[in-house]
């Protein structure tokens, strides 16, 4: 789908600009999202914040 997470960040940044979407901060979550968010934040010259999350497990479904 994307050559890398960095490439995905560049594409996301361009799409945000095309649609006129603006913000004050870019938020990323670990396990790949921070890499994408860092590229977007750098290109848009915005602050980057990281939110730590934990998956809530279900007893009989490890993917839920």
Image (cartoon, helix red, strand yellow):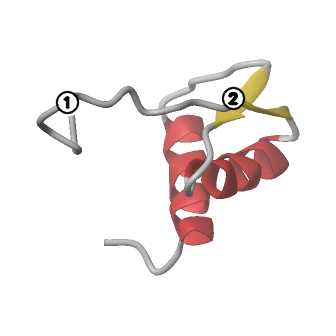
- The answer to which image quadrant residue 55 occupies is top left
Establish if 19 lies above or below 14: above
Q: Position of residue 44 (x, y in %)?
A: 78, 41
Quarter of the image where the N terminus is located: bottom left
The label nearer to you, 2 versus 1, is 1
Say which element carries label 1.
Answer: loop
Residue at the extreme front of the image, as rendered: 59
Nearer to me, 52 or 32: 52
Q: Position of residue 16 (x, y in %)?
A: 54, 37
Which residue is found at the position 40% from the left and 72% from the top? 2
Name the residue carrying label 1.
Answer: 59
- The answer to which image quadrant residue 10 occupies is bottom right
Taking 24 as reference, is 51 left or right?
Answer: left
In this figure, what is the number of numbered marks?
2
Say which element carries label 2.
Answer: loop
Q: Around disc 1, counting alpha carbons within 10 Å, would you say few (fewer than 14), some (14 to 19), or many (20 or more)?
A: few
Q: Earlier in the sequence, mark 2 or mark 1?
A: 2
Which residue is found at the position 52% from the left and 49% from the top? 12
Q: Distance between the Cα atoms at labels 2 and 1?
A: 25 Å
Taking 24 as reference, is 21 left or right?
Answer: left
Q: Which mark is residue 51?
A: 2
Which residue is found at the position 56% from the left and 57% from the top? 32
Taking 41 as reference, is 32 left or right?
Answer: left
Q: Position of residue 39 (x, y in %)?
A: 72, 56
Q: Position of residue 30 (x, y in %)?
A: 62, 47
């Amino acid at each position: 789908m994307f050559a890398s997470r960095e490439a995905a960040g560049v594409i996301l940044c361009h799409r945000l600009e095309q649609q006129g979407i603006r913000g004050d901060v870019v938020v990323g979550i670990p396990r790949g999202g921070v890499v994408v968010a860092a590229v977007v934040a750098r290109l848009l010259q915005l602050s980057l914040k990281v939110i730590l999350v934990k998956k809530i497990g279900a007893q009989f479904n490890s993917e839920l």
